[in-house]
Image: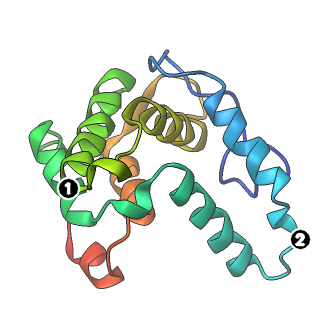
Amino acid sequence: MAVPGTGGLGGGGGGGGGGGGLAGDGRLLVADLRHHNFDAIRFASYRTAAKLRFVQKKTNMHRVDIWNIIEAFRENGLNTLEPYTEVKVSRLETLISTLYHSLNKRLPVGQNVVIETSTSVLLNWLLSAYDKDDEGKLRVFSVKVALATLCSSKPLDKLRCK
């Protein structure tokens, strides 16, 4: 269920199945979206872009490129799964955590991200956006699309990857 005022980019409860993160992170992100009043932006495409950029910055995905995402999928064995295979929250949390661990290896010490917080916020946003039935599972394809959308690579590189 999407929360009014978010345009469907965040919503509901903080996810299902107990992802190990803070359940309120999804709600905090939605509250922050409301606070910034992105709904005042007139054109839907600009409004959507502003909301996605906000989520991208909050989750630190603006620092991650598509190649890091591909590598994280390979490390966690998700690259061989069929697109419509459902993945449990625990495995998804491991994937996201791997993503941020590899990011911290690339960044200078003073610019490292807090892995637990970033993982929790991103996981809860993914669950609130894609797990409408509160089952605690997401399709591999949905995760790939969401992470590819939020990462900082060139559009051509994003489209090139399977």
* Quadrant of residue 26 within the rendered picture: top right
The reply, left or right, for residue 81 in relation to residue 104 is: left
Residue bearing mark 2: 40
Asked if 151 appears above or below 3 in the picture, the reply is below
Q: Find residue 47 and report its horizontal and vertical position in percent.
A: 73, 73
Q: Which mark is residue 131?
A: none
Residue 88, by quadrant, is top left
Image point 14% across, 52% down: which residue? 71
Q: Residues within 10 Å of mark 1 (few under 14, many from 20)?
A: few
Quarter holding the N terminus is top right
Q: Left or right: 38 with respect to 52? A: right
Q: Is residue 94 in view?
A: yes
Residue neighbourhood size for the residue with mark 2, other residues' Cα within 10 Å, grouped as few (<14), some (14–19), many (≥20) = few
Q: Which residue position is annotated with label 1?
A: 106
Up/down of 43 relative to 60, above or below: below
Which residue is outermost to the front? 110
- Badge 2 or badge 1: first in the primary sequence: 2
Q: Where residue 60 sits: x, y (%)?
A: 45, 53
Q: Position of residue 42 (x, y in %)?
A: 86, 80
- The residue under the point 67% across, 70% down is 50
Residue 2 in view, yes or no: no
Could you tell me which secondary element the residue under label 1 belongs to?
Answer: helix
Q: Look at the numbered disc 2 and give the secondary structure of its residue.
A: helix
The residue lying at 56 percent from left, 51 percent from top is 58
Gap between marks 2 and 1 measured at Cα: 37 Å
Say what amino acid the circle numbered 2 marks. Answer: Ala
- Amino acid carrying label 1: it is Arg
The C terminus, quarter of image: bottom left
Residue mark closest to the camera, 2 vs 1: 1
- Residue 133: x, y in percent? 59, 28
